[in-house]
Image (spheres, coloured by chain):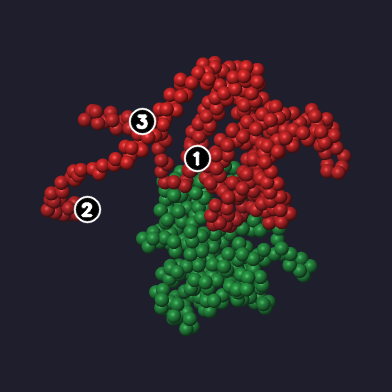
Chain colours: A green, B red
Amino acid sequence: MSEPTEAQAAVRPMVHSEGVEKWFGRLQVLQGIDLQVKPREVFCIIGPSGSGKSTFLRCINHLEKVDAGRLTVDGQLVGYQERGGRLHELPDKEVCRRREEIGMVFQRFNLFPHMTALGNVMEAPLRLKDENKAAVRERATALLRRVGLSDKLNVYPTQLSGGQQQRVAIARALAMQPKLMLFDEPTSALDPELVGEVLEVMRGLAEDGMTMIVVTHEMGFAREVGDALVFMDQGQVVETGSPRDVISDPQHERTRSFLSKVL
Amino acid sequence: MDDEGAGVAEAPARSRPEAIRAVPVRHPGRWVSGAIVLVVAAQLIHWFVTNKELKLGTVRHYLFDHSILVGVGVTLELTAVAMIMGVIIGVVLAVMRLSRNPIVAGGSWLYVWFFRGTPVLVQLLFWYNLPTVARSLSLGIPFGPSWLPQNPKDLITAFIAACLGLGLNEGAYMAEIVRAGILSVDEGQVEAASALGMPRLLSMRRIVLPQAMRVIIPPTGNETISMLKTTSLASVIAFPELLYTAQIIYSRTYETIPLLLTASIWYLFMTSVLSVGQYYLERRFARGALRELPPTPGQRIRRWVALRRGRALT
């Protein structure tokens, strides 16, 4: 809303949301979201289901259209451009180009079942980037090694465990060399004993300085790896702060009652 | 680990329960119904073999007759061309139908409505007789200048008319099959492709259609088998496929039934071969959907033989 102060201007936020609203028909799922994600930050979003946290995440790469407010990624407006004081919808091609720079990991993995693990990771860069196949293969192999799956290159997703599938999905998103990673409840569909291996990969990413927005129910992860945390409820940001403070000393009644149920 | 192993070994050894040897239930009904079917089948075969009017010798004589073999080839050719046309048109129509542009989607709907709503026999006759009303066909910009002025009589031969009639009609059916296949693919797949930055058509081609194939292939196989038989309709426009070839022969020799039998044997043979082909095609597109593919009949026989041999050795 206001002009950025000098301190804010020094570090341009990776994601800047001002009064973002979203409607599904008559239902308002986002009621004015204000938040900032700084570069190299691990930003966690927690909240009950139906609170709009996944919808907000999907607005960031324009899988959902923002109905009101301003949402920018790396200084660029999401889904629109300003020309002559008016907003113009971005053409599909430009939307796609910007999505290339934002990786996304889904709750249900959404790996391409007709391709091997290596095929999944190579597909997008092979089709969208101006690189030769050998270079893409090399990077994809390195990424799969990084997520601990160098022995599963030629295996189809159905032959992998949930945790392995999600690690392939992370490698697939990284293959486009994004500047921002979105995680939509990446461990919610996993058996409890498989959660750790995925969180371990995410922790490694955070240590390498990747900017990450993580919608999660893993309070342990949020407290240990997160740099900032928001609690959302009914389409609103209820509480913001450092994960440690919010989780151990919530200021709002709604945050307190939510945390008492999940901790 | 060692400790655990020792623990298991120390557990008191349980005596295995005795295997059950029960008297099986009798099924007299099965014996009776089986016997009835056998008697009816035997009667039919007896009639078939002893009936002099059928002239099985004539059937055998014409089975590998040169003109019949040519007719078989032409039937296969027409089936292939019409199906390829049908599949291409079907994919285009299905993608059009799912377009966000209402005019494009409406055009696809109209096509399917028209070609599914009229008999294919009528369409064949229509295309064949079209030259009588369309005096000249031309290729060019709509309502603009044109090149290649053609006499439609030369352009629309019986073959072209048969291909158009069968192929355009098939396109309408294939469109519905392809659309069902596309809709069967999980929405998360398109979302994952979009999130990676893949444009709609690319994700359709690389992500959605290959997965839709699993749903598309079985009915397409049925359509191909059905098409092989439907090509016989082209006999009404004097297109020399298998049936028309047989008709030409029996109009000369009056051996109607033997020649129809000859044609039927070839149709049966070709549809059987296509069914086997379909089986292997379905396996090919099940990749990634099943953890382990079921064995093919060939593999099953080989395993069975290996098992037998193994038993014989021990």
Reading the image, the residue beneath label 3 is: B302
Indicate which label's residue lies in the foreground, 3 or 2. Answer: 3
Q: Rate crowding at label 1 as few (under 14), some (14 to 19) or many (20 or more) other CA atoms within 10 Å.
A: some
Quarter of the picture containing the C terminus of chain B is: top left
Q: Nearer the viewer, mark 2 or mark 1?
A: 1
Name which of mark 3 and mark 2 comes first in the sequence: 2
Neighbourhood count class around disc 3 (C-alpha, 10 Å): few under 14, some 14–19, many 20 upward: few
Name the subunit of mark 3. B
Residue A134 visible in the displayed image = no
Alpha carbon distance from label 3 to label 2: 40 Å
The dot on residue B1 is: 2
Q: Are marks 3 and 2 in contact (CB under 8 Å)?
A: no
Quarter of the image for residue B26 reads top left
Give me the residue at 48% from left, 37% from top. Answer: B279
Could you tell me residue A56's position as x and y percent?
57, 69
User: In the image shown, does A26 or A195 lie closer to the viewer?
Assistant: A26
Residue type indicated by callout 3: Arg
Mark closest to the chain's N terminus, 2 or 1: 2
The residue sitting at 43% across, 77% down in the picture is A259
Chain letter of the residue beneath label 2 in the structure image: B
Instruction: Respond whether the residues carrying marks 2 and 1 are from the same subunit.
Output: yes
B84, above or below A24, in the image: above
User: Which residue, given by chain and number where applicable, does mark 1 sit on?
Assistant: B282
* Spatial separation of the CA atoms under disc 2 and disc 1: 45 Å
* Residue drawn at x 58%, y 73% as measured from the top left: A29
Cα distance between the residues tagged 3 and 1: 21 Å
In the picture, measured across the screen, residue B114 lies left or right of residue B79, that is: right
